[in-house]
Structures are given as C-alpha cells and as structure tokens.
Amino acid sequence: MFRLISTTVLAMAASTAWGQTAVPLSFEVASVKPAAPCCAPNQWRGNQIGADRIDFQYSTLKYCITFAYGVKSYQVSGPNWLNEARFDIVAKGPDGTRREQLPAMMQALLAERFKLQVHREMKEVSGLTLIVGRNGPKLKESEIGAGDGRGGASIGMSSTSEGTMRMTAKGATMGSLVNTLTSVLGQPVIDKTGLTGRYDMALEYSREDAAGFRVASPPPGPSSFGPAPEPAVSIYGSIQQLGLKLEAGKFPLDTIVIDHVEKMPTEN
C-alpha cells in the first residue's frame, strides 16, 4: 500500500511540474508602440534589460526577435521591413521573474502583439572559422579573477580619433571571442581552436570590418567614429597577431524562419 501511495504522489507531482513548465511565460504589463523619430546619437540610451523587465527604445522588430530566440540577426529570415520599422517596447514580468525568463516572455509578447509565427530550420551558411595559426597561439593568459566579476569576460569597445575601432577583452574564452567577432563582423564565427583557457587581448579593426554593428540599430545621425582609419587596419590582421586565423567556409546553422508577422502591433 505504501508503495502504491508513493507512486501515486510522485505521478501527481510530476504531472503538476509538467503543467507548470507547459504554461507559457508572459509579461504582467507591456506597452508596445511604433517609435517616434529618434533622438540625437549622444542622447540615445539604447536597450535596457533588467532583472525582471525590458525597455527597448527605437528598436527594430528583428532585434526583438533575436533577443527572444537567442540568435543573431543573420539567423533570422523574414521580410525586409524587420530591419526598418522601429518600436518602443516596455514590459515587466510578474513578481519573482528571473532575467533568463525574459526571452521566453518576449516570444509570447511578439506572438500576441505582432501575431508572430516562426519555425526553426537548419541551413548551410557561409561564415568564418577561428583556428590556431601555423606557429601556434600568442595569447596572454588572464590572471585569476580577471573578467566581469561574475565569471564572464570583460569586453570593451572604443574608437580612436583616427577612426580605428578597438576591442579589449579580459578573462575571455574562445567562446566569448567568437561571439564578439560574430557581432562585429555580422556573420557567423565558430571556434575550432581547441583552446580552453581565459585570455587578455586587444584587437584593432576598421569601420568597414564592423558590418554587424552597422546592422544593429543605432539611431540616424552623424557618425561618432571619427575619420576613416588607415587601410592597413584590419581585424583579420589583428587576429593573426594573436597567433590565430579566420578562415572562410560553410557550416550548418540553426535559423529562425518567419512564417507570419504583422507590421503594426495590436493596441496596448
């Protein structure tokens, strides 16, 4: 009898747990509206992500989709206007919301307000592979505790008065490096170095290299990057100085394909 009761209780607990995980996460309150013409570049505050809320200003719908599904912009296939129409989205989760739940809540919000329907599809794409160069890596290993203080890498972006872009990283793994290169270059970069340590490094590159940042969605306005850099400045050359190399190739990649989406959100 005890065994039967225990089995029944476990089954009920499993059923309850399954019911809890099956309930879609959603924001408690949300405002979604087309964005007005944006501010001057030095007044643009960008997208804010808190512990239980988001505040996206002048964002493209494609950016919102990449946040919701944890992908890069080149992994989203859909109409061209996804990169053009701008929206202001402010939303807050219920009490107890965790930061990692926000993307799932965004998925539900996009489905409700934009009638977004998607499916995932593996596609062969062109991209870059990061490998170790012929003479081996020339990387500086990080000191213990280097990084952002939370176990991740500390990565900074800046530009010189000559127009050269600069990326500095402390406590960076090869994973965090390829993620940053993916954002900078606007195309997939995968790690095939086999390196498992944490490193401090600096890379310099031209604005022409930074295709990904031009796609991202800063507001229109005069460039804040200064004049064009010397033609010799290249992220590929900077990578080679670290004893690494970027090789072009093709590989399978998970993509988000838009089946249906409406350009105007439903009323708040």
Image (spheres, rainbow, N blue to C red):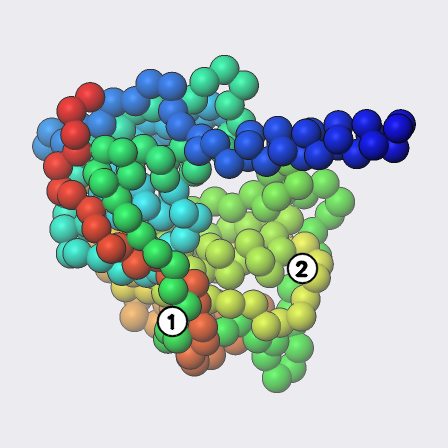
Q: Position of residue 230 (x, y in %)?
A: 30, 66
Label 2 crowd bin: few (<14), some (14–19), many (20+), radius 10 Å: some
Query: Given contact means CB atoms under 8 Å apart, are the residues at marks 2 and 1 in contact?
Result: no
Q: Nearer the viewer, residue 132 or 120?
A: 120
What's the residue type where badge 2 is placed?
Lys
Image height of 5 relative to 221, above or below = above
* Residue 36 in the figure: left or right of residue 248: left
| Image quarter of residue 9 | top right
* Residue 230 in the figure: left or right of residue 251: left
Mark 2 or 1: the one toward you? 1
What's the residue type where badge 1 is placed?
Lys
Q: Nearer the viewer, residue 12 or 63?
A: 12
Q: Is residue 158 visible?
A: no
**Circle 2 is placed at which residue position?**
140
* Residue 130 in the figure: left or right of residue 3: left
- Residue drawn 62% across and 29% down? 16
**Circle 1 is placed at which residue position?**
123
